[in-house]
């Protein structure tokens, strides 16, 4: 099922590139506006590519997520810069685009009476980037292919980066070593032209007299996403057993040359579209013919431009497919895109909201496969996470310490491809600097339950169960009996500060039983109980303890302002901490958790009050979290307002989310928020259009997924659902509410009526795998 209309970001000028083309200009943390705000991202999980679309010297920047250099507190490094020198200064009819329908970037312009085109994509099945270049006149294509290694540092002790670039025939090989983790890296660029000439020079290749040319690029390092990388504490030895990437990269490049561009492209399309095409979303076409930067500007002025709203939604799905694929590292804080020497926050996997938000759209927006890379990452770090739980319990609850490896697992805020950190965000020796409580682990494990709940895949359940169980086992130890309640001790609501003026002079507030930790512990135990019931593990000792403890967690308390209390000791809203804080950690039970739902009306009301009091304006991802929360609070117009705010105040012209700086979490949170407006299922039934705004009075969606692995389509007019369709991927009891359809009647595909049980507007039907039912209002 294709989208109702083409989805593309497009511009009439190239991305700016200031002081370009010398490695020395890309200074650490210097904001290279062109890259962050204007370049267009491609990716296949294994590599990320930013295309500038320039005509004088094209800049194509390449990222590989394992090339980390933790020197000076940073993390991910820029892998390579590929320059294509055309020398076309004066051009006409310029256009560049990123088409989401085929995950392809294109550049087209006229220079000297010739039309030049470029087409670029990153293929997951063939693990490479491919570029096709053409000229409208025979032999008019002439350019130099010049890759370089940015941020080479020969002399920085302990943190050096060395490398060289060699051209031979039609192949350029770039390789080197980054000292800290002894990372060996290699990239290859192969140039092909059916009718032109290719000359290898000193580190680059000249192409001339061509009408058509192709470049294939593949990159790799000796990194492996395996346990030993995390449990080996000597950075130099982490990658010691793994082979140099040369053979792997050579294999990819040879395969590319053998296949040729058209086959590579067909394989790319087949792979990409098998994921992307599953979902369509339509609420109006206005804005389609406006360049994306102008579209965003006009949107900020308040124009109604639904095309941008659809585009941003699908862009989030596109980015997830492009940055999170099985076999590669998961999507980090910037997905798989980084041009810096020291990337912001090290491009880490930040676990007090950011990395979880990356995966919030995965299940509902029909991309469950993208979660596999995070699940595999978790399998790799789990042994270290268990060691850290041992240390943590030893330091804080020595009386509860069990044998090593028997204390559950823990994850703190900061995590990277090579190491994770403990739950306080600080060190065991100095826990006072921590800023996020033990709930961060359960904030993570919730994704594993959702993975199963949305897919109903036994394999996912078998992976989720031990993760939930071991997390509960750890959490049992972190709670203390206080007047009959079990409260997390050393509890911290992520990043909330007290005293001083905001960050200046302030410090993190440490307490007992804050809402964040209590709600997350509750959700983990609850998910464990559901998983255990399915697997017949009800008698497991941890499951029994979770059952005993769950009712004593008291996850939601309402204060005198009618708010959900962030802290038990708080009376009125905002008494403790920054009242407009970006984190809304006391609402994690509303989203992504589900203990606050439409069956708990008093809590729901308190959640709304809290959202009002907290305010809408915040950083990129924080607005996205509010959007999801308002959708769960079933206020469509307010959710829509948040979506508009996110787009207007937290989005760069290339539609990347602006924390600022660029963080990809807000993109993903935006996509999940819109999905939540359209479809929810956390309260035990499928809820169609639970938060539909007036602005989307007419529209349709196809392919969203509800828990139970039911795929849902709907069409509506004047906010009334005209027809909806539910397809059972795995079958089972389907429960549904569709308050926007009067007296729904159920049909099979042949138009035969199907009986449904009606329980106060909640209908249920037992469905077979593959079966579909269609809902229509009674005539
Ligand atoms: C969390 C947030 C910050 C930032 C950082 C990467 O700690 O509180 O705002 O997004 O992650």
Image: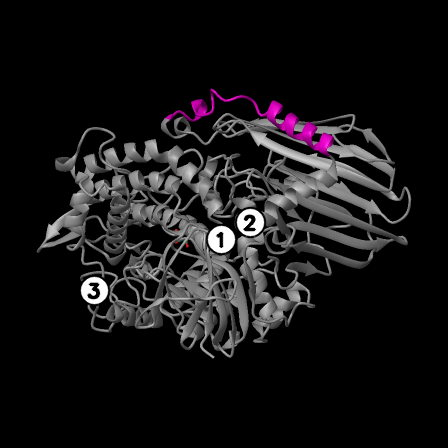
Mark 2 surroundings within 10 Å by alpha-carbon count, few (fewer than 14), some (14 through 19), many (20 or more)? some
Identify the mark at residue 11; answer none if there is no mark.
Answer: none
Q: How far apart in space, not on screen, are marks 2 and 3 (Cα)?
A: 41 Å
Q: Which numbered dot is residue 557?
A: 3
Q: Where's residue 201, x and y in %? A: 79, 28
**Count of residue discs:** 3
Relative to 311, 546 lies left or right:
left
Question: Mark 1 = which residue?
Answer: 366
User: Which of marks 3 and 2 precedes in the sequence?
Assistant: 2
Q: 10 or 452: nearer the eye?
A: 452
Q: Is residue 38 visible from the viewing direction of this image?
A: yes
- The residue to which callout 2 is attached is 275
- Counting residues from the N terminus, which is met first, the one under dot 2 or under dot 1? 2
Prevailing secondary structure class for the magenta stretch in the rendered image: helix
| Disc 2 to disc 3: CB gap under 8 Å | no
- Relative to 444, say whether 760 is above or below: below
Mark 1 secondary-structure assignment:
loop
Crowding at dot 3, Cα within 10 Å, few <14 / some 14-19 / many 20+, comes out as some
Q: Which residues are magenta?
A: 232-259
Residue at 53% over, 55% down: 316
- Up the image or down, 543 lies above or below 226; here it is below
Could you tell me which secondary element the residue under label 2 belongs to?
A: helix
Q: x and y percent of residue 326 in the render?
A: 50, 39
Task: Determine the CA span between mark 2 and mark 1.
Answer: 8 Å
**Closer to the observer: label 3 or label 1?**
1
Query: Is 97 placed left or right of 348 in the picture?
Result: right
| Residue 244 drawn in magenta | yes
Measure the alpha-carbon separation of dots 3 and 1.
34 Å
Q: In the rendered structure, which disc, 3 or 1, sits on the residue that comes first in sequence? A: 1
């Amino acid at each position: 099922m294709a989208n109702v209309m083409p989805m593309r970001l497009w511009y009439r000028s190239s991305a700016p590139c200031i002081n370009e083309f010398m490695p020395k200009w890309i200074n650490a943390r210097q904001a290279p506006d062109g890259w962050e705000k204007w370049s267009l991202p491609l990716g296949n999980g294994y590599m990320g590519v930013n295309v500038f679309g320039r005509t004088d010297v094209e800049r194509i920047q390449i990222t590989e997520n394992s090339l980390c250099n933790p020197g000076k507190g940073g993390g991910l490094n820029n892998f390579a810069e590929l320059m294509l020198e055309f020398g076309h200064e004066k051009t006409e009819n310029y256009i560049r685009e990123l088409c989401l329908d085929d995950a392809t970037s294109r550049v087209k312009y006229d220079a000297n009476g010739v039309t030049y085109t470029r087409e670029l994509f990153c293929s997951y099945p063939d693990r490479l980037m491919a570029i096709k270049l053409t000229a409208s006149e025979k032999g008019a294509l002439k350019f130099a292919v010049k890759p370089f290694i940015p941020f080479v540092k020969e002399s920085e002790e302990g943190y050096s980066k060395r490398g060289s670039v060699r051209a031979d025939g039609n192949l350029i090989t770039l390789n080197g070593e980054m000292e800290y983790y002894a990372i060996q890296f290699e990239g290859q660029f192969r140039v092909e032209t059916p009718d032109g000439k290719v000359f290898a020079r000193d580190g680059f290749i000249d192409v001339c007299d061509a009408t058509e040319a192709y470049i294939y690029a593949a990159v790799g390092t000796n990194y492996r996403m395996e346990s030993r990388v995390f449990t080996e504490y000597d950075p130099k030895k982490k990658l010691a057993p793994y082979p140099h990437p040369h053979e792997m990269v050579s294999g990819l490049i040879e395969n590319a040359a053998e296949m040729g561009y058209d086959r590579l492209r067909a394989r790319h399309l087949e792979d990409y579209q098998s994921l992307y095409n599953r979902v369509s979303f339509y609420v109006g076409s206005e804005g389609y013919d406006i360049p994306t930067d102008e579209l965003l500007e006009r949107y900020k002025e308040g124009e109604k431009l639904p095309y941008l709203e659809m585009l941003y939604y699908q862009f989030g799905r596109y980015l997830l497919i492009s940055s999170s694929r099985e076999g590669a590292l998961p999507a980090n804080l910037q997905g798989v895109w980084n041009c810096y020497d020291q990337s912001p926050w090290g491009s880490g996997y930040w676990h007090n909201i950011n990395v979880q938000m990356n995966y919030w759209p995965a299940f509902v927006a029909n991309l469950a496969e993208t979660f596999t890379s995070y699940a595999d990452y978790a399998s790799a770090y789990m042994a270290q996470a268990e060691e850290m739980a041992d240390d943590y319990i030893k330091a804080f609850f020595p009386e509860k310490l069990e044998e090593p490896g028997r204390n559950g697992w823990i994850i703190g805020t900061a995590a990277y491809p090579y190491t994770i950190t403990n739950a306080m965000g600080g060190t065991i020796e100095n826990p006072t600097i921590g800023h996020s409580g033990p709930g961060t682990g359960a904030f993570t494990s919730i994704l594993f339950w959702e993975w199963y709940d949305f897919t109903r895949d036994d394999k996912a359940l078998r992976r989720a169960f031990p993760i939930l169980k071991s997390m509960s086992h750890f959490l049992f130890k972190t709670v203390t009996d206080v007047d009959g309640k079990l409260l997390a001790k050393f509890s911290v609501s992520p990043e909330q500060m007290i005293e001083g003026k905001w960050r200046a002079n302030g410090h993190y507030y440490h307490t007992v039983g804050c809402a964040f930790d209590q709600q997350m512990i509750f959700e983990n135990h609850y998910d464990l109980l559901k998983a255990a019931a399915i697997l017949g593990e009800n008698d497991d000792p941890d499951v029994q303890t979770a059952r005993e403890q769950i009712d004593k967690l008291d996850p939601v308390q309402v204060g005198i302002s009618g708010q959900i209390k962030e802290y038990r000791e708080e009376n009125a809203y905002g008494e403790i901490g920054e009242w407009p804080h970006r984190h809304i950690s006391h609402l994690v039970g509303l989203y992504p958790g589900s203990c606050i739902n439409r069956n708990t009306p008093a809590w729901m009301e308190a959640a709304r009050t809290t959202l009002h009091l907290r305010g809408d304006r915040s950083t990129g991802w924080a607005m996205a979290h509010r959007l999801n929360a308002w959708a769960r609070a079933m206020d469509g117009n307010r959710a829509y307002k948040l979506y508009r705010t996110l787009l207007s105040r937290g989005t760069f012209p290339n539609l990347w989310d602006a924390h600022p700086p660029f963080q990809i979490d807000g993109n993903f949170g935006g996509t999940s928020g819109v999905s939540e407006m359209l479809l929810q299922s956390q309260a035990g039934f499928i809820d169609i259009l639970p938060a539909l705004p007036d602005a989307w009075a007419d529209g349709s969606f196809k392919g969203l997924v509800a828990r139970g692995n039911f795929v849902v389509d709907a069409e509506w007019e004047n906010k009334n659902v005209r027809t909806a369709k539910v397809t059972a991927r795995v079958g089972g009891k389907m429960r549904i509410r569709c308050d926007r359809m009067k007296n729904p009647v159920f049909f099979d595909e042949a138009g035969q009526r199907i009986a449904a049980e009606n329980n106060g507007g909640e209908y249920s039907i037992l469905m077979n795998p593959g079966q579909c039912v269609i809902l229509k209002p009674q005539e």
